[in-house]
Amino acid sequence: AQTVTQSQPEMSVQEAETVTLSCTYDTSESDYYLFWYKQPPSRQMILVIRQEAYKQQNATENRFSVNFQKAAKSFSLKISDSQLGDAAMYFCAYNTGTASKLTFGTGTRLQVTL
Amino acid sequence: GAVVSQHPSRVICKSGTSVKIECRSLDFQATTMFWYRQFPKQSLMLMATSNEGSKATYEQGVEKDKFLINHASLTLSTLTVTSAHPEDSSFYICSARLGGGTEAFFGQGTRLTVV
């Protein structure tokens, strides 16, 4: 069974600084997709960034970037120039294609301090 | 991006009654919808996968007779919690997938409180 592990229950970062959230996964599939979702206090799930496993280039979305290490099955999220609005729960997730369900990690709660 | 609307956002019901939660894809057709349950400070737990026009596929341990899922059209799926009990109190979230796509779009969630 596929599993997604987030080893950091909580992280804290100062405003304007950079923070990296860790995620590892386990799969026997060769083609799959990885995602980072943000869940703010409103609890609305928001897609932050996605990565296709067949792409070697790391995905970036403005201040958000990933470090995708396929051999190590690692998919970390880097948030640069952290803002107060980045405070939220962050979930790493995985699926294998168009019909596949998402498997979520346990989440990392990110605090942003002044 | 695509919009998924979930209704109601909050509901309180009496023990023993049933409550229906709706999940609508507003600007796209969703052949597949997913229903999740989230306990406080925990991750999302998939309850079932709903495909338009067919029976839902339930995850292990989820009571299909208690959590009735209907996906009668390409834009609407419903979750009915039957004979609700206080332990069913939770946050329920739906998501919908664009046909042929890999990204899932989430509704706003429904906080169910059974008293």
Image (cartoon, rainbow, N blue to C red):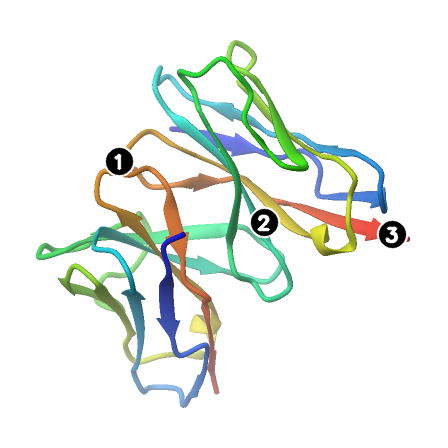
* Residue A49: image location, x then y, percent: 53, 37
Q: Residue furthest front?
A: A62
Q: Residue furthest top?
A: A71
Label 3, on which residue? A113
Residue at x 48%, y 52% (from the top left corner):
B44
Residue at x 30%, y 72% (from the top left corner):
B22
Cα separation between marks 3 and 2: 18 Å
Label 1, on which residue? A98
Residue at x 28%, y 39% (from the top left corner):
B101
Q: Chain of mark 3?
A: A
Pointer 1 or 3: first along the chain: 1
Inspect this view and state whether residue B63 appears: yes
> Are labels 3 and 2 assigned to the same chain?
yes
* Residue B7: image location, x then y, percent: 37, 76
- B72 lies left or right of B86: left
Pointer 2 or 1: first along the chain: 2
As drawn, the label of residue A38 is: 2
Residue at x 72%, y 56% (from the top left corner):
A85
